[in-house]
Amino acid sequence: MKVLIVYHSEHHDNTKKLVEAIAGQGDVTLLNASENSNLNWSDYDLIGFASGIYYQKFHKDVLDSAEKNLPDSKKVFFLYTCGVKRNSYTDAIRQIAEAKKAQIVGSYGCLGFDTFGPFKLVGGIAKGRPNDEDISKAIHFFSEITEES
């Protein structure tokens, strides 16, 4: 199975740690959403969107890439890292995927070290995350969705 993961990872490379670990699990291409690319997304069997959480949603570059490049009726999944867990973080990317008639096969989120805004004053939250257990769970999540797809 040929997999593309479109990601954005900025402050502490929390999300990048997850996608790089997953990339070692098979035929996975990583695409930084902030960079220009000539990849044909139609060539992939499964497309993942991965991001840290910015203002309660995926980074704008990931959302814009999905809106512009996601072919209709693709299988997709979501990965994210955040300072505080909430259920609504995938709402915006989910809306884009649903508008493109994508089949959403799963979502995985974990804590990530966060020093944005007021968290900087206290030295950040979720220190040491994602940790080895979070990364292992992300790999397990990926293995499960690729077995089912």
Image (cartoon, rainbow, N blue to C red):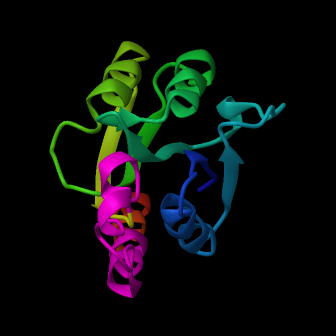
In magenta, the rendered stretch is 114-139
Where residue 43 sits, quadrant-wise, is top right
Left-right relation of 80 to 24: left
Q: Please name the residue shown 81% across and 34% down the image.
A: 37
Q: Is residue 88 above or below residue 46?
A: above
Left-right relation of 4 to 102: right
Q: Residue furthest left?
A: 87
Q: Please name the residue shown 29% across and 37% down the image.
A: 90
Q: Quadrant of the N terminus?
A: bottom right
* 134 drawn magenta: yes
Q: Position of residue 59 (x, y in %)?
A: 48, 35
Q: Is residue 36 above or below residue 141?
A: above
Q: Please name the residue shown 31% across and 56% down the image.
A: 119
Q: Position of residue 125 (x, y in %)?
A: 29, 66
Q: Is residue 122 above or below residue 49?
A: below
Q: Residue furthest front?
A: 121
Q: Residue furthest bottom?
A: 132
Q: Please name the residue shown 66% across and 30% down the image.
A: 42
* 61 drawn magenta: no
Q: Position of residue 109 (x, y in %)?
A: 30, 57
Q: Position of residue 138 (x, y in %)?
A: 38, 69
Left-right relation of 148 to 66: left
Where residue 113 sits, quadrant-wise, is bottom left
Left-right relation of 104 to 4: left
